[in-house]
Image (spheres, rainbow, N blue to C red):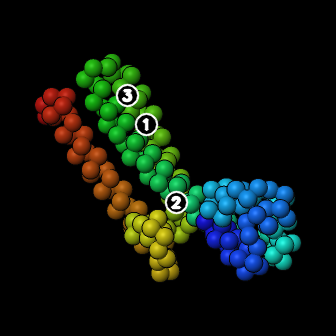
Amino acid sequence: MYFGKQLALMRKQRDLSQEKLARQLYVSRQTISSWENDKTYPDLKSLLILSKIFNKSVDSLVKGDIDQVRYQMMRRKIYWLYISNIFCLILIYLAFTSLHWLPLSISLILMVTFTILGIENTFYLIKFSNRTNLHNVHQIMNYLNGKTSQANEINKRNLWIQYIAGGFLGIFISLLFLFLISKYILDIHF
């Protein structure tokens, strides 16, 4: 993270050892080392004292870390949204294959439940991508890899074309899987 490097640099510029800085902050030398190695983060009281010692605002001390934490949280959210979408698809197909050994009503309830969860998750993913201005896989992958992509400008017409094309592709792949599962796993003849 940014804070630890910044603290070590400011401390060295002031010609302070970790021990001297620790005495001024009423903490141990190991605590300072832990902060500088980004293992822990100072509490508010320590941040206020640090801002006085180094004549910097608390905001300037932690600003880079706030942006980094926000980026990491969004990155984690994107990963979990995609993983949960894939998980819902797997559960839908498992519920479909359960027709072979479970009663029809239970299998249908499972299929409907997982389908609703998947649709809800997909709508949340679409809202999230609109909010963050990430509309296609290339932009999302650039974001997840920490690369800044060019302006994510996309007009609404192209966005709807992408959504509709993706929907049809998803329906086609789903029908193909349902056909293959029906024919080869459930042994249903058409």
Residue to which mark 3 is pinned: 108
Q: Earlier in the sequence, mark 2 or mark 3?
A: 2
* Disc 2 from disc 1: Cα separation: 25 Å
Image coordinates for residue 153, horizontal then vertical, percent: 50, 78
| Image quarter (top left, top right, bottom left or bottom right) of the N terminus | bottom right
- Tell me which corner region of the image, top left, top right, bottom left or bottom right, holds residue 68: bottom right
Q: Give the number of the mark in front: 3 or 1.
A: 1
In this view, the mark in front (2 or 1): 2
Residue labelled with disc 2 = 75
Q: Secondary structure at mark 1?
A: helix
Q: Nearer the viewer, residue 61 or 105?
A: 61
Q: Residue at x 83, y 62 (%)?
A: 23
Residue at the disc numbered 1: 114
Circle 3 sits in a helix, a strand or a loop, which is it?
helix
In the image, 73 versus 83, the foreground residue is 73
Instruction: Point out residue 4 in the picture as x, y percentages from the top left corner.
Output: 66, 67
